[in-house]
Amino acid sequence: MAHCPVSAVMGLRERKKLAAWRTIRSTALRLIDERGFDAVSVEDIAAEAGVSRTTFFSYFASKEAVVFDLDPDEVRQWRELLENCRTDTPLWDALTDLALGLARLLSERLPLQKRLLEQSPGLCRSTRGVCDGIEPELREWLGRRCPDGDDVRTALVLNTAMAAVTTAIDAWDPHQPYDRLLELLSDCLRWAGAGLAHPVS
Amino acid sequence: MAHCPVSAVMGLRERKKLAAWRTIRSTALRLIDERGFDAVSVEDIAAEAGVSRTTFFSYFASKEAVVFDLDPDEVRQWRELLENCRTDTPLWDALTDLALGLARLLSERLPLQKRLLEQSPGLCRSTRGVCDGIEPELREWLGRRCPDGDDVRTALVLNTAMAAVTTAIDAWDPHQPYDRLLELLSDCLRWAGAGLAHPVS
DNA sequence: ACCGAAAAGCGGACTCGGTACAAGTTCTTA
DNA sequence: TAAGAACTTGTACCGAGTCCGCTTTTCGGT
């Protein structure tokens, strides 16, 4: 089997699993886009995707997760981004680069997610946001990078960076060009980095 | 009836309502403290408080709300804090004062809430946090104070301040003295105000 | 003191998200 | 090819949250 690259890397099982994941997700996004988050039940999604409700929950931990979870490919790329991150640049610059890199990575999915958020009140009230999925790994990365730093300060840096990213995504209108989002991200991170107590620079 | 101060201000109806609110809330906090958030159902709370499940939901919009909602008295004091806020001090200083004032206001309830959060995984995953209840009014206050400011920057200031407060509350151990929390709040707001890109000052 | 209106409380039925489990099916691997 | 792991499925169950029709309590005017 060594001559067949795909099945050498991924067995049939894994390939089917990924396919099912993507079928469920795309089905869900389509239905939610059509009817709104609250008007689509997990049953509907499962039925339309040709799986059982049980199976849906074996792929996604919650109904919101099907909107916000990252594709395994995206997770892989995000991990690469984290690993290839230079360690000699100042921390805040590194975080800014990561945020912009992530935004480029998600350029396909983010506009849709933004649209769904806007037209689904139930989704806004949800625990999760567009970029919450990456937080645990980012937190771990930060801990590795600042092993002997003040824990409170490290947590503050992370939470503030997340707040800046959230603010930028919030402020962005999905009808605007994607570059506008990158601009907002860059602005928000620069402002937060420079200090909100100072006047605009 | 004008000679009776209490019933002049609040009719029997209102007084009963407030009493019921406080009964439900204190019952809920006691049960949750004893058994943990996830092991107490709304039924349990309602039964123990001597009301029906329906009535519970007429007082609190969700199960989490019974933990996080502010007492009407606290809301009143918080509004006074907002109104009496000086308009000549720099914005970030005003926000810092508000945060510290709020923390003093909630000194009774916050340690308990923090304890409940620590021992109830279901509560952590919740949409709401300890200080989310005040956000809408704070946002409105901020809009009134900066009517002609850049919307994105204003949103960033608010979100960052909230992140700083959340970080401080997170970092605080309820077994520590309450002054330690005020210290953490002050530190986090100072750091965020000075800019996370700068070294510690 | 009484009456009609408004507000609050109640029980019950319902929807839906999420979990547990036991059985069946499909892939892997030795 | 057979044992066994991984995946799917139906069913039953729990609890949060909503809706509705009904009764009880409070309020304002007479």
Image (tube, coloured by chain):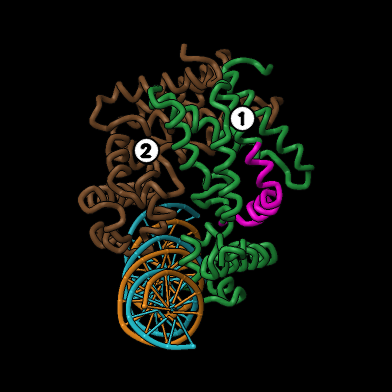
Chain colours: A brown, B green, C cyan, D orange
Q: Kindly identify the residue that appears in the image at 23 percent across and 31 percent down.
A: A175
Snapshot quadrant of residue B146? top left
Horizontal side of C10 relative to C15 (left or right) equals: right
Q: CA distance from mark 1 to mark 2?
A: 63 Å
Q: Which residues are magenta?
A: B101-122
State whether residue B193 appears in this view.
yes
User: At which x and y percent is residue C7?
Assistant: 43, 69
User: Could you say where residue B121 lies in the image, as x and y percent from the top left?
Assistant: 59, 55
| Image quarter of the N terminus of chain B | bottom right
Q: Amino acid at mark 1?
A: Thr
| Rendered residue at 52%/30% (across/down) | B160
The tag on residue B96 is 1
Q: Nearer the viewer, residue B81 or D21?
A: B81
Would you say A168 lies left or right of B163 here? left
Q: Chain of mark 1?
A: B
Q: Position of residue B187 (x, y in %)?
A: 68, 27
Choose between B197 and C10: the one closer to the eye.
C10
